[in-house]
Amino acid sequence: MAEHETVVRWDDGSDVGPGTDELSGLDYMRKVVAGELPESPMSSHAALHVVSAGPGEVSVRCSPDESHFNRIGSVHGGLMCTLLDSALGGAVHTTVPAGTGFTSIDINVSYLRAVFPENAPLLCNARVTKPGRRVAFAEGEVVDARGKTVATATSTFLVFALEDRPRRRG
């Protein structure tokens, strides 16, 4: 059995500086797309890249490598769920005002097809179905390189004031 190693590098955002809490979610996500703000650490680990962001909509590309495969050599369902959660959350992010955060309450994923390496990259298109001041709802689908829908999801998000979040210790 061959052993492999993956090195993951990410920007923890500690050097982003003051002011990001003052950006609307849409402005924040557009800066991520433009490369002016970093992707999340999870995005680096899961090979995710936000490719577009508009009001209530986000698209995220995933380029899985061997470290994202399951025992039979297809893309692990957990990676697909992470892709969907990231895109749906990003779509919700575009609807919230400055100083507002969000977190997943639930996610319901339907896996429609196995995804093998030759069917990558994957693209997840997500949209908000109902924005809200306390709770928001979103849906999305993952399409493979052949244009086939391979998974869909719906999700509910808790929306909260960022001032309520605990501060990260350095």
Image: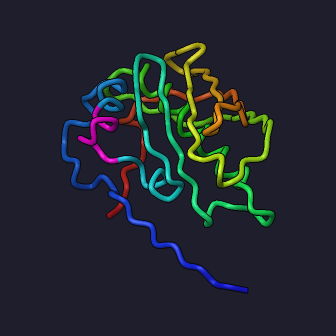
Whether 82 is among the magenta residues is no
Q: Compared with residue 80, is residue 44 higher up or lower down, i.e. above or below? A: below
Left or right: where 4 falls relative to 12: right
User: Going 51% across and 27% down the picture, which residue do you hit?
Assistant: 159
Q: Which of 17 and 42 is in front in this view?
A: 42
Figure quadrant of residue 84? top right
> Residue 106 location in percent, x, y?
69, 35
Left or right: where 75 falls relative to 67: right
Q: Which of 13 and 164 is in front in this view?
A: 13
Q: Compared with residue 96, is residue 102 higher up or lower down, i.e. above or below? A: below
- Name the dominant secondary structure of the magenta segment: loop
User: Going 53% across and 33% down the picture, which residue do you hit?
Assistant: 89
> Residue 1 location in percent, x, y?
73, 86
> Residue 102 location in percent, x, y?
49, 33
Q: Which of 81 and 93 is in front in this view?
A: 81
Whether 35 is among the magenta residues is yes
User: Going 54% across and 78% down the picture, which residue do you hit?
Assistant: 5
Left or right: where 121 falls relative to 20: right
Q: Compared with residue 163, is residue 41 higher up or lower down, i.e. above or below? A: below
Left or right: where 78 falls relative to 16: right
The magenta stretch spans which residues? 31-38
